[in-house]
Each structure stands twice: as C-alpha cells, then as structure tokens.
Amino acid sequence: MKGSTYRRCSCRDPKTGKELGTSCPKRNSRNHCTYSIRQELPPREDGSRRSFARGGYPSLKAAQADLDHVRALMALAESDDPEGVQLIAEMLSEVSRDKLPLPDVEETRRRLNAGQDLVGSLTVSEWLDRWLAGKRIRKSGVSRYETDVRVHLKPHIGDRRLDRLRVSHLSEMFTAITDANAEILEQNAQRRAAVEELASVPWKGLGNRARRKAMKTAIDAMPPFRRVTGPSTRQHVKATLRAALNEAIGQQIITFNPASHVEIDPVRKPKALVWTDERVARWQQTGEKPSPVMVWTPEQTGAFLDFVAADRLYAMWHLVAFRGLRRGEACGQPWSETNLDRHSLTVTGQLVQDGWDVEASEPKTDSGFRVVALDDDTVSVLERHRKQQEADRAEWGPAWVDTGLVFTQEDGSWLHPGKVTDLFERLVAASGLPPIRLHDLRHGAATLMLAAGIDVKIVSDTLGHSDTRITRDIYQSVFPHVGKSAAEATAKLVPLQRKTAAEKAARKAEKVRKKAKRAQKVGDENKYRLKKPKK
C-alpha cells in the first residue's frame, strides 16, 4: 500500500492566516521545515479508507525510520489472515489518532499470536476487576482481596496502564500510604485531645454549656478516628497485587511483575512469651502485655480450666488448650469425624467469618486436613459433652437444629466464631488470670507439647502446619524451667577446670591436712616399732 514522506512548512500568511506551503520563502532553508509521513492502511470493513499520519520529524532519516516501522508492523499479519490484518490496521489507526508511541514489532508479534489486545490500554483497575471476578476461593478470602483493591490499589494505581506499571509507581504508592498513616495519627491525636478536654469541662453553668457546645461542634468537624495501615496490611496489599500481576503474566498480558521487586518494611511476627511471675506483676501494675502473643504456664492453664469447668463449652476450651485446634476448626468439628473409641478426630472443615456472616469452609491448606490424637482425659471430657448435648436435644425437641457438630449453641445451631472469642475473653477476665487471646490457647498447646519433649514434626502435624519451621519460629515459647534444665544439661557436657580463689584455698588446705595426717600415721608406726620388745 502507498506510503510516503514529505516536507511540511507550517508558516502562515499574516494577512489570510493560511499556510504558505511551497510558497514559503524560507522553505529551502535546511532546518526550517519538518518532515511528515503518511501510510495507507487496509480499509475498514465498511470499505471506508484510513491511514497512518504523523509529522514533526526533524529530518528525513527520522521520518523514513518511522515509516519503515509502520510497514514492519503491517507485515506482521499474513495476507490470508483478514482478522489479523484488521487488528493491525485498527492498532495503527488508534496509535495515529491518540499520538501514541509506535509499539515494538516483536512485542506486537507476541500479542498478535497470543490473541491479546495489540494496544495495551488495559488499566490496572480493569485488570483487578477481571482478576477478582475469576477467583474461585472461599468468600472471606475474596473479601480480603476486594478490600485491598478498593482501599489501596485502585485509588493509587488504578488509572495506570497495566503494561506500563513500574516498580517506582508502587514505591510511590507505599510512600503515600506511610504519609497518610502519619496524617491519620496526628488527626487521631487531635481528636483524642479534644475529646479529653471536653470531658474535663463541667456540665453546669451557662458558660460551660456554651463552651461544651462549641467544642462538640469542633469535634464533629474533625475527621473520625481511623486505623492506620500497618506493616502486615501493607505486605498483604503487596501480595494481592503480586498475585494479580502473576495471573496477567500467565495470560501473556504483561511480561514483568513490579510487585515482586518493590521493597517495603518487613513484618516481624511477635514471639510468644510465657506469663512468668515477673511479667504478671508488671501487668498488674501497668496493665500492659509484654507481647501481643502471650502463653499461660501449665499452672495458669489448669487454673483457667478449673474455673470454667461448669461452662457449657468447657469441652471446647479443653480441646483447644490440649490439642491446639483453631477456633474455626473447633466450631466446625462434626461428630462424624470424631471417633472417641479410637481416641482421634479428623479435621476436615471449619466455620469462618466473612464480615459478621458465617460460612462453612474447607481447611485453608492441605496440611489443615489432619488426624489429631486424643488423650484419655480429653476423650472423657468429650463423652460427657456428648451426653449433655443429647440431653439438650431431648429438651428442645422438634426445635433442635441438627447440624451434626460437636460444639453448638443451646438449640444445636452453629456457633458464631466471633461470639466464641468474646465469650472466651469474658471468661479470662472473670478468672483474674493474665489476658491471652483464644488463639493463644493454641500457642499454649504447642508449647506444652514441645516442653513435654514431643518431636517437633508430630507437634507440627497436630497443629496442621505445612512446615516444621513455622512451629519452631512461632509457637516454641519455652517455659522457664524447661529452659533452665536444657541450660544445665548443656553445661554439663563441657569439662571445665577453672576454680575460684576460695576453691583453690580450700583444696590446698585439704592437701595440707591429708599430708599432715599421713605424716602422723607414719610417726605412729615408727613409735610402735620402737616400743616393740625384741625376741
């Protein structure tokens, strides 16, 4: 198809305003005119003509290079591929109309062969919507992804073209999130100070009432209390984007994932600490927990179980404390997978929250499907619980909801995991023991097993971990007496000859005493020989 390069002068007649064109007196000057190109494109399906046109080239060489580039793009589609010819023509027409850079020939060839859009106009926001629509995971997982997309990704990078997303764009996004955190903290502090000041103003008195009214108006005008985006949330946002972009790479829409290369602050998972006497005393004085993850000692765990012995869900607290089931696993454990005769139960599902709604779901990972051995005492506890449940069933009669679960509400219906957590916290507060979370009972079970000398692989399998490193890194909070025993056993393996000054003096005195005793003994023997009569 026809194509050409040509010179163009943009000078205009000062009287008429029309371009002078070839009549421009400066046209023959070397650097006066610019060069333009025009390439005829295949006609549209309705037969109308279209072309690629572009100007402003400083030299004929630059114009010819772009004309050759356009022709190379047109040559990508074979003549017997009318669909490909039309796609290339539409692409070049759009590039010409929107004054976009000419796409790379090899990249266009790859996109054409893969059946992708030749002009990468897909935005990050559009791709994230498409990616979310194709997710086939449990509802709560999709909701978490949707939150990351709605709150963070779309507002910061949603308008950017997917194929032009760079690491620098993501660095700017996380910097903006950090800056927003600082602003939120400042606004929260201002609002908190205003609320505290309002609380200090007396209610009585005309002046006080006027002041309170003015302060309330000022507080209402302030931004509400907001949560900052912490390090773990930022890591999750990054993971969400990385997963979405990996899917785009798998579909050959892009070739590079910038989310895999952006650097953000690492998250340090809190280590579990034991409630020692010193830490308990400090907590009683200040009300502060030494760590977000705290573990009771065996004595404290026993005290709590004794305190809740009459609670309707005692069997659940007992099971979590000794066997380390997760909250959702305990709430969703069916009797059909609980074999008390064989002293075992099989974890095959769980109840999970999506917002405040509850739904049944499979374990999150393959390692979550597991068989958990039960000790004799736990079996006895579950047998008593089953008898009580049967009595409840008889009392409720036709109104009983037959869910088939081990732990239920009074009418047999599902337990709400959130309400179970609230109940546990109230029981802990009433017991007077130092606070722990319900999930910390699971930490405690892991720690008890490790302290009892059980192999870490068995502990990991019991907890449903995919790797023993998780067990070691997170759950091994060693009790003080266990650590002391290990330290003593280790020290005894190394023979040492060092002695203190007192030990050296005592040893020297002992040698002198023994030498004197031997001398005295020798003297006694000699004396005996002198007194012995001769034969």
Image: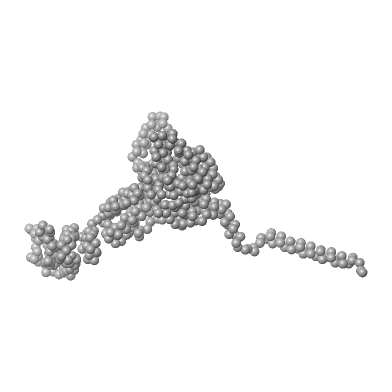
Residue 330: image location, x then y, percent: 44, 45
Name, please, the residue furthest toward the top.
205
Q: How many marks?
A: 0
Residue at horizontal 17 percent and vertical 59 percent from the top: 90
Q: Nearer the viewer, residue 216 or 422?
A: 422
- The residue closer to the viewer here, 331 or 508, is 331
The answer to whether residue 101 is above or below residue 329 is below
Q: Viewed as shown, does residue 168 lie left or right of 406?
A: left
Residue 43 locus on image (x, y percent): 12, 61
Does residue 164 appear in this view?
no
User: Quick one: which residue is furthest to the front in this view?
Assistant: 341
Please tell me which residue is depicted at 49% across the width and 55% down the height of the picture: 458
- Residue 63: quarter of image: bottom left
Residue 119 percent location from the top left of the image: 22, 59
Side of 353 relative to 525 (left or right): left
Answer with left or right where residue 48 lies relative to residue 406: left
- As drawn, 331 above or below 515: above
* Quadrant of residue 57 within the rendered picture: bottom left
- Where is the N terminus found, in terms of image quarters? bottom left
Residue 173 visible within the image: yes
Q: Position of residue 39 (x, y in %)?
A: 13, 64
Q: Residue at x 40, y 55 (%)?
A: 265
